[in-house]
Amino acid sequence: MNDEDLPQSEREDPRREFRHILMGLASASVLTALAFFLAVAKPLATGWLLAALGGLALVQIAAQFRFFLHVDLKKSHRDDLQLVLFAGLVIALMVGGSIWILFNQHARMG
Amino acid sequence: MSEELLYWLAGDLRWSDFPPKADMIATIAALIVVAGAIGVVATLTIARRWRWLFDNWLSSLDHKKIGIMYMVLAFVMLLRAVIEAVLMRIQQALSVNAQGVVSADHFAQLFSTHGTIMIFFVAMPFISGLINYVMPLQIGARDLTFPFMNAVGLWLSAAGAAILMASLVIGEFSTGGWSGYPPFTELAYSPGEGVDYWIWAVTLSSIGTTLTGINFATTIYKERCEGMHLFRMPLFCWTSLCTAILMIFAMPPLTVATALLALDRYAGFHFFTNGAGGNMMNYANLFWLFGHPEVYILILPAFGVWSEVISTFSGKRLYGYASMVFAVMCIAVLSFTVWLHHFFTMGQSTNVNAVFGIATMLIGIPTGVKVYDWLLTMYRGRIRLTAPMLFAMTFLLCFVIGGLTGIILANPPVDFQVHNSLFLVAHFHNMLIPGTLFGMIAGYMFWFPKAFGFRLDERWGRIAWACWSGGFLAAFMPLYWLGLMGMMRRTAISFEAAYQPWLNAAWAGAALIVCGIVALGIQLVVSVRRRSDLAVPVGDPWDGHSLEWWTPAPPPEYNFARRPRIEDTEAFTNAKRDGRAYHAPPSYEDIEVPRNTLIPAGIGAAGFVCAFALSWHIWWAALLGLAAMWAGVVLRSLQGDTERVIPAAEVQRQNEAWLDCARQTAPVTRFAEVERINRGRAMETT
Amino acid sequence: MSAGKNLHPGINLGHSDPAGHHQAEPVMFGFWIFLMSDLVLFALLLATYSAMSVHGVAGGPEPRDVTDLASAGIETALLLLSSFTIGMASLANKYHDDGRRLLQWLGLTAVLGIGFLAMEARDFASLIAEGAVPQRSGFLSAHFTLLGCHALHVAAGLLWMAVLVLQLMATGLERALRLRFMRLALFWHMLDIVWVAILTFVFLYGAAG
Ligand code: HEM
Ligand SMILES: [Cu+2]
């Protein structure tokens, strides 16, 4: 494994990695604080509020994958990125489908 | 002894749970299991084979041996499940306006164990075994990435199978079918140990399967030999990869479903109960989130086998390799989008049903592509009708019928008519027997010479094929008709005289299937007896084209003296054509192989204890079993020296002996491959 | 697969131990796959929870009755900080040969993890004291199961950490151990990600909905 062969952005560097982790902490803190604020102050109508909270969670999950787990678009991380994206697809299908089905059934039972 | 103390010690287990049982047939079955166990122990003792068994097999981490053990497990369980199937067929044939031979409750246990065993302890071990054996060889690897975990997977599956065997002797099994739907399987309606047996047997198997899937996927991603790009892999490896991915993502829903059911039963939760906000429909949803991908786990490896068998015995490259790969990937992804077709009738709106119905029909497209590709592979090939190829013919014919009935069932309005009828039973057996089971049998016949160094007897192979094919058609085609006449599945007694002739035909077919199994047994015995006549030490009896044929038969522990380097999908074929297939490599090197260890078998045994104790509420033993399982894992992490080195000189000696043997062996043409002169060196192809 | 070029995302050994790095590749990939499988499990528990929290209340407590935002906030802070500390532990694992620094960061992580579990235990105890037991309704069954499953994972992570620390003290930071620490770090980060989903869909939705 020869470090020199890699593009600048992929070389080993403890300081850069440290900055990464700090950024992870900072972004997660900000996003969490924002979410708590929304949930407590309720500045939006319920539907929008829930959507905003869900959106913030997705952003935070993406940020944690990026900064803590270092899954990104670099070529050397492709296998893992593909794996995570495929898992995301499966989860979306399963969770989305289940919720659709269960709420639909429930609505018709009333 | 006080009741309380007894409960602490033995949970709900009492003497009355042991044989003899209330019903004569059940007692006989229990005795057969006990006698079988005693017989195995006695044989091993008399033949002084215990050491051999432990040293060579039970403690092995070699993917080839683990593969073979998986298949032994599958064959043993197949025997039991087929006997149960025949019993069910006899019962239904004799119970039109009559009592038949078994009670309704016993009949329910029969279809529950039959279904559970066939899916989890026949088809799955068969698949894991075949992939285990073949895939690393095909990609030019020395083993799977995680040999220890591989063995753990095997022993967890074996522990699950052992729970099913135990349930035949001690207590009773679930009557809730292979799908275990609540609320019937809740404590209120199924209070005994049966459902618990089912839950834990399935849980053991699903943990093992998840581990195995992770292992297969990692191996295919990370252990391919030089030059083996993904798109140069043999099709069997592609199907293995897709199966592995399905195992990884489809097992969690099953785990969730059974775990929540267990919480309901053990801790009084209300996930699927009738009252207190429980929702049994969520169980169906979770179960089929697993169940549908599961059927593709079962069929995809068989697709891989068919691709290898058909192209080899047609003497042609596989037609449309890229379209085959693409089709498999489509099928794998689509299989996560159709689970609702198993419960069209559960009450969701037409729109929901329509979406899932259409998604289901879409799967027909890539599947059709595959069928055409197989046909075009045969087109203008010089086909040799060996036993595996004959099975392939039956497969192609029957699979199309089964697929068409699947498309019919994908129409919600039609499904409303035939849901849970024998039409459905006919449909899924039509996929599972000619598809999965025949695929596994064909794979077994195809790769047997590789694994053991001699071919299987061809004549008995053909007899087996005739019995299985005829038996299948006779046993299952009538069920379509019965289903349309309105006969429901899982019925112990019926009251419609018009069913009778069809039920008779079905039972005759089942009897013919039994002949097929007997023929397979005879084939094995005859072949072992004549093994020197059938020997193929050079290792390439069928003029194969993938790397597994480029090794001695049986291959050495480390698979390849030097890991191959390839530049084409047909590397071995090219080497044979250029006359350099059996040239010595320039140099040899030391090879590390994993040392044997008994820890995985220990983990399996602990898993069995845990599952058994949980089923009978023997809490101390359950905790002990669980702790022992984890202790095994920790113990392994403390083992320092897990590899053994085979010195280069030894590798060289073995490899040169093989090369000498190859050079001294007269090549045979494809058309003499079932003759005695086939010593495993197929003629260089031109 | 051009050998070697496949650096393992972030959590890796890189050039500080090239041979170990090479060995790490399949091992880490396998562990990633396991994590994704585990993630599906959590996703389905969450889907079950979402249905149950609406349909399974059965006249008992509703989500908003069992949501204690203050407590959830503290739990979130603890877990997020522990994600940071285990990130620092990974850096120590990669760039420092003596295990001391690694041990310090792991110790901090363990304290945070135990604090998280203690808070959750307190939540559970107060719910049970109010009669909001899992046997009360489908909704509460789902609530306890989802959170309990996550807590079990955290506890398993802590146990794993304990075993590794004992090994570290016995043998020093050898290669096999480094690889195991890398996997532990991945596991721990993933639990934080799962928590983000739980926080949002259980607690914040409970408070907002
Ligand atoms: C070898 C010949 C076989 C015969 C004669 C046979 C026969 C039967 C019969 C009679 C039933 C009960 C049908 C009913 O409910 O009325 C059944 C159910 C079933 N069989 Fe088979 N079968 C065979 C092979 C297989 C194979 C190879 C598989 C799977 C790999 C399989 C999987 C199942 C399943 C999943 C059920 C449903 C069990 C349930 O209702 O819960 N069978 N089979
Ligand atoms: Cu299906």
Image (cartoon, rainbow, N blue to C red):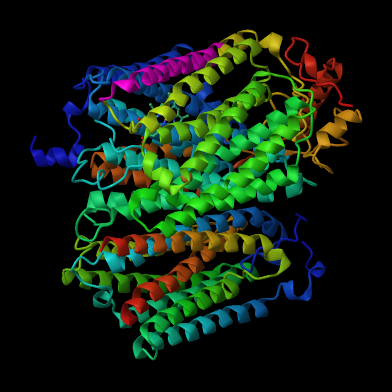
Q: Nearer the viewer, residue B129 or A5?
A: B129
Ligand 1 falls in which quarter?
A: top left
Left or right: where does residue B569 sit relative to residue C19? right
User: Which x, y percent locates residue B355?
Assistant: 48, 57
User: Which x, y percent locates residue B270?
Assistant: 24, 57
Q: Residue furthest left?
A: B2
Residue B336 in sight here: no
As for residue B488 lying within the magenta part, the answer is: no
Position of the N terminus of chain B, as image quadrant, is top left
Position of the C terminus of chain B, as image quadrant, is top right
User: Which x, y percent locates residue A18?
Assistant: 61, 79
Q: Is residue A64 above or below residue B657?
A: below
- Determine which quarter of the picture holds residue B591: top right
- Determine which quarter of the picture holds residue B583: top right
User: For the point 48% across and 61% down, which residue is it?
Assistant: C39
User: For the point 58% across and 60% down, which residue is it?
Assistant: A86
User: For the point 63% across and 61% down, which residue is it?
Assistant: A82
Q: Disc count in the image?
A: 0
**Magenta: main secondary structure:** helix
As for residue B516 lying within the magenta part, the answer is: yes
- What are the residue bounds of the magenta stretch? B495-522
Residue B587 in sight here: yes
Left or right: where does residue A20 sit relative to residue B673? left
Q: Is residue C195 above or below residue B439?
A: below
Q: Is residue B83 above or below residue B217?
A: above
